[in-house]
């Protein structure tokens, strides 16, 4: 029930943020739409510990701002490489063992790597990630990285 209620609240707040209007009709439509989507998600058994991991929500409030800053720093670094006349690229692939234990943690880590410009998670398994980097430094920066530690913390592993 807590997952259903929190999903409804998140969907309704998303509706309000995207709408930007606070008339009774639009707020009522938002409530009905959020209830309908939450109901259908629950009927499709999407609202479970993996599909909607509400227990990880507090960690997201810390992880997302950090990830956003990392994406900005990486985008700046990739822009400098692209605009450099020498074009100092050194495409590299690395394999490493991620520190996450849950599927949600593995997916979060792989998606975070891919969201960061200059790197992409090519292959993801429980025991190994294969990452391609635009430069040798960006690829090797994924191995035993701060991102790995932060996703472990987000996942609940200190």
Image (cartoon, helix red, strand yellow):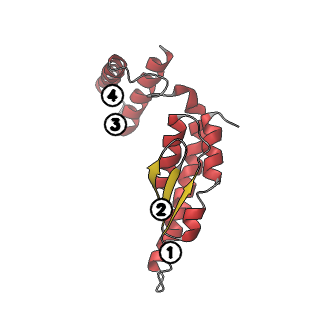
> How far apart are the alpha carbons under marks 2 and 4?
49 Å
Q: Earlier in the sequence, mark 1 or mark 2?
A: 1
Q: Earlier in the sequence, mark 3 or mark 2?
A: 3
Query: Regarding mark 3 in the picture, which secondary structure is present there?
Result: helix
Query: Is there CB contact under 8 Å for labels 4 and 3?
Result: no
Query: Regarding mark 1 in the picture, which secondary structure is present there?
Result: loop
Q: Position of residue 124 (x, y in %)?
A: 47, 47
Q: Is residue 36 left or right of residue 111?
A: left
Q: Residue at x 58, y 36 (%)?
A: 101
Give the farthest residue toward the bottom: 85
Front label number (3 vs 1): 1
Q: Residue at x 33, y 28 (%)?
A: 23
Query: Is there CB contact under 8 Å for labels 2 and 4?
Result: no
Front in this rendered view, residue 125 or 77: 125
Give the farthest residue toward the front: 127
Q: Position of residue 66 (x, y in %)?
A: 60, 50
Q: Residue at x 53, y 46 (%)?
A: 109
Q: Within 10 angstroms of label 3, few (less than 14), some, or many (20 or more) residues?
A: few
> How far apart are the alpha carbons under marks 1 and 2?
10 Å
Q: Is residue 13 left or right of residue 37?
A: right
Residue denoted by label 3 = 19
Front in this rendered view, residue 128 or 52: 128
Give the farthest residue toward the right: 158
> How far apart are the alpha carbons under marks 4 and 1?
55 Å
Residue denoted by label 4 = 23
Query: Regarding mark 4 in the picture, which secondary structure is present there?
Result: loop
Front label number (4 vs 1): 1
Q: Is residue 53 left or right of residue 29?
A: right
Query: Regarding mark 2 in the picture, which secondary structure is present there?
Result: strand
Front in this rendered view, residue 33 or 140: 140
**Can you tell which mark lies on residue 90?**
1
Residue denoted by label 2 = 132
């Amino acid at each position: 029930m807590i997952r259903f209620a929190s999903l409804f609240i998140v969907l309704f707040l998303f509706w309000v943020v995207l709408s930007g209007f606070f008339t009774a009709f639009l707020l009522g439509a938002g409530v009905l739409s959020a209830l309908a989507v939450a109901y259908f998600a629950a009927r499709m058994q999407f609202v479970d510990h993996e599909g909607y991991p509400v227990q990880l929500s507090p960690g997201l409030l810390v992880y997302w701002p950090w990830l956003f800053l990392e994406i900005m720093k990486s985008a700046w670094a990739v822009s400098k490489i692209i605009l450099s006349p020498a074009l100092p690229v050194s495409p590299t692939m690395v394999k490493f063992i991620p520190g996450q234990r849950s599927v949600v943690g593995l997916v979060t880590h792989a998606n975070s790597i891919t969201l960061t410009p200059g790197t992409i998670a090519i292959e993801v398994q429980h025991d190994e990630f294969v990452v391609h980097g635009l430069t040798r430094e960006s690829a090797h920066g994924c191995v035993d990285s701060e991102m790995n530690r932060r996703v472990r913390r987000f996942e609940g592993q200190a």
